Image: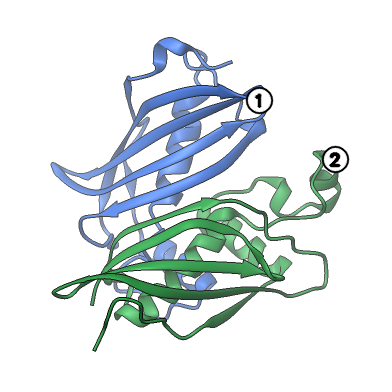
Amino acid sequence: MINPDSVGRTFKGVEEVTVTQPQIDAFAAVIGETDTSVAPPTFSIRISLSQYESILTQPEIGVDWTRLVHGDQKFEIFRPIVAGDVFTCSATIETLRIAAGNEIISVRSDLYNGSELVVTSWSTLVVRG
Amino acid sequence: MIEVGMTLPEKVFYIDRALLKAYADASGDQNPIHQNEEFALSVGLPNVISHGMLTMALAGKYVTEWAGGSASVREFSARFIKPVIVPAGEKVDLTVIATVTEVDGNTVKLDITATSAGIKVLGMAKAVVVK
């Protein structure tokens, strides 16, 4: 059960994440994109999801990652991600509701390269009861 | 000329187990429901299912191909309403089509429809692109 006190709070990412060209190349290859000068629009999920996992599974928050389903996803992209970007990623738990025994968490991720906000994304994560 | 109500050409992507493995490696999402049939069945799924985010990434490719590349997307959202089921040894379709819902200068809003085996898999899928 997620700690209700965590709702409305912003948690800092556990580490800086450097984007490499091979990461962009691999992601682009899966979807058949040949221009790898910038990352595909959904590339940042690679960073956000792993940061969410590290942050939200901490005992003080208590999300059970093994029962997680991804409900929806939204990206707001201020500029495309490129190799060499070094991101800090925060997770803000915006809302929590319980429906049919499932915990439904809406969490926002802000990816900053230095002081520049590059991508904000929102994920609805469903922890099945 | 891009006008509201215009429908973009349909595109069909194919998803198989090899693509799921490639996406798992590229995205870091190694959840076994996307690779291991025995595990998927054990948690009540009908078979191995695609990552919702792979479906969305392919829909994104559809959009960027039309709009002029990966840098063109400003907003992109989708709801994962039904799983894309990927049986062993099969290639399943992901069929994507979109309609223009708003045009403001070079900014275009799109409603995207994505189906697999005739079933709608993304809900409320929308993109804002600069074309």
Colour basis:
by chain
Q: Secondary structure at mark 2?
A: helix
Left/right placement of residue B121 relative to residue A108 reads right
Residue at 28% of width from left, 60% of height from top?
Answer: A81
| Colour seen for chain B | green
Q: Look at mark 2 in the image and give the residue it sits on.
A: B42
Q: Look at mark 1 in the image and give the residue it sits on.
A: A100
In the rendered image, the residue lying farthest to the bottom is: B1
Looking at the image, is B88 positioned above or below residue A59?
below
Label 1 sits on what residue type? Ala
Looking at the image, is B37 positioned above or below residue B130?
above
| Colour seen for chain A | blue
Image position, residue B11 (x, y; %): 53, 82
Mark 1 touches mark 2? (CB < 8 Å): no
Front-lying residue, A25 or B82: B82
Looking at the image, is A91 positioned above or below residue B45?
above
Image position, residue A45 (x, y; %): 43, 50
Residue at 34% of width from left, 52% of height from top?
Answer: A75
Quarter of the image where the N terminus of chain A is located: top right
Quarter of the image where the C terminus of chain A is located: top right
In the rendered image, the residue lying farthest to the front is: B5
Left/right placement of residue A102 relative to residue A81 reads right
Q: Secondary structure at mark 1?
A: loop
Q: Where is residue A99, by image quadrant? A: top right
Q: CA distance from mark 1 to mark 2?
A: 21 Å
Categorize mark 2 by other alpha carbons within 10 Å: few (<14), some (14-19), many (20+): few
Number of marks in picture: 2
Image position, residue B103 (x, y; %): 22, 72
Q: Where is residue B12, by image quadrant? A: bottom right
